[in-house]
Image (cartoon, rainbow, N blue to C red):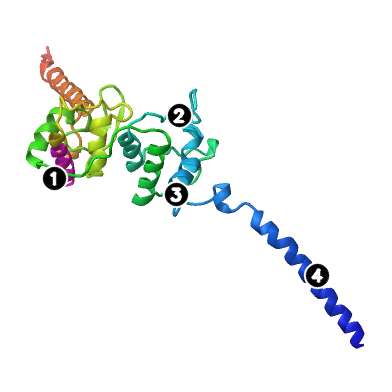
Amino acid sequence: MDRTRSQRARSLIAWAVTVVAVVLPWSATAPSRAQTGEVSAAGRGGEQLYQLYCATCHGTDGAGIPGAGVGAGPPLRGLEVAYVDQVLRTGRMPILEPSVGVVDQPRFTDGERAGLVAWTSSAFDLVGDLPVMREGSVAHGQELYGRHCAACHGSTGSGGTSGDGVTVPPVRGLDPVAVFEATRVGPFEMPRFEAEVLTDEQVWDVVAFTQEMTTLEATPLGIREMNRVTMTVMAALLLLAVLGVVLVTGRPVPVPEKDD
């Protein structure tokens, strides 16, 4: 009896050793969630974030993917570092597109964004420097904003559609550094403002004004924006109203016929 129990014990130990010998190497080499991309952005370094969220369209070497469509992207080499930082700060990049494998919603912390920008800058020879936050004059910024920005972003910075049919993002309370960067690099369809047009001091004045925009009241009729498209629509409605009044008041008054 004791001999039988001893044999069974040895068999169980042998099986346990076999299972451990098989499972441990497999678990060490099995792809983790991080390796398969099924992770959030939390805790990942700049290179890892780039490969997970950016390389699909911009290429692993930053040379870009030619063509059109969601899988194509421009080259990053030689781009301004402020451009990369700006589109990440505002969330305009990366573009989430399941068809090209970018399916996680990135939630970059400030540290992760800074790490991604720093790695991209080093790996792809980005040029320039990131701006350093400065104080500005709200009053002067309001004047400059009305002259250079309101035509597209609207009088209260709520964005909308420009006269060219381009969707314009809001700037009310936007990250101040992102506003400065956008002014200098001109992301997407936005024109860039060189120092000959707006000095750094003037740009920071505009930034100061955009931070105060959240306190601005809505325009008449509850309309938040008075950009070119809104003003054109309102002018057209006003013209139709005037024409309607003219047509109504200009009709001849019917004279009742007399009975014989």
SS at mark 2 in the image: loop
Three-letter amino acid code at disc 2?
A: Gly
Above or below, 12 against 58 in this view is below
Q: Earlier in the sequence, mark 3 or mark 1?
A: 3
Q: Residue at x 20, y 44 (%)?
A: 133
Q: Which mark is residue 15?
A: 4
Q: Residue furthest bottom?
A: 2
Q: Earlier in the sequence, mark 4 or mark 2?
A: 4
Residue at mark 2? 73
Q: Is there CB contact under 8 Å for labels 2 and 3?
A: no
SS at mark 3 in the image: loop
251 or 4, nearer to the observer: 4
Above or below, 89 against 14 in this view is above
Residue 93 in view (yes/no): no
Residue at mark 3? 45
Q: Earlier in the sequence, mark 2 or mark 3?
A: 3
Image: magenta residue range = 204-214
Three-letter amino acid code at disc 4?
A: Trp
Q: Earlier in the sequence, mark 1 or mark 4?
A: 4
Gap between marks 4 and 2 measured at Cα: 54 Å
Q: Dot 1: few (<14), some (14–19), or many (≥20) neighbours within 10 Å?
A: few
Q: Position of residue 33 (x, y in %)?
A: 57, 53
Gap between marks 2 and 1 measured at Cα: 36 Å
Q: Position of residue 40 (x, y in %)?
A: 47, 51
Q: Residue at x 12, y 42 (%)?
A: 136
Residue at mark 1? 135
Q: Is residue 207 magenta?
A: yes
Q: Classify residue 124 as left or right of residue 226.
A: right
Q: Earlier in the sequence, mark 4 or mark 3?
A: 4
SS at mark 4 in the image: helix
Q: Position of residue 188 (x, y in %)?
A: 33, 28
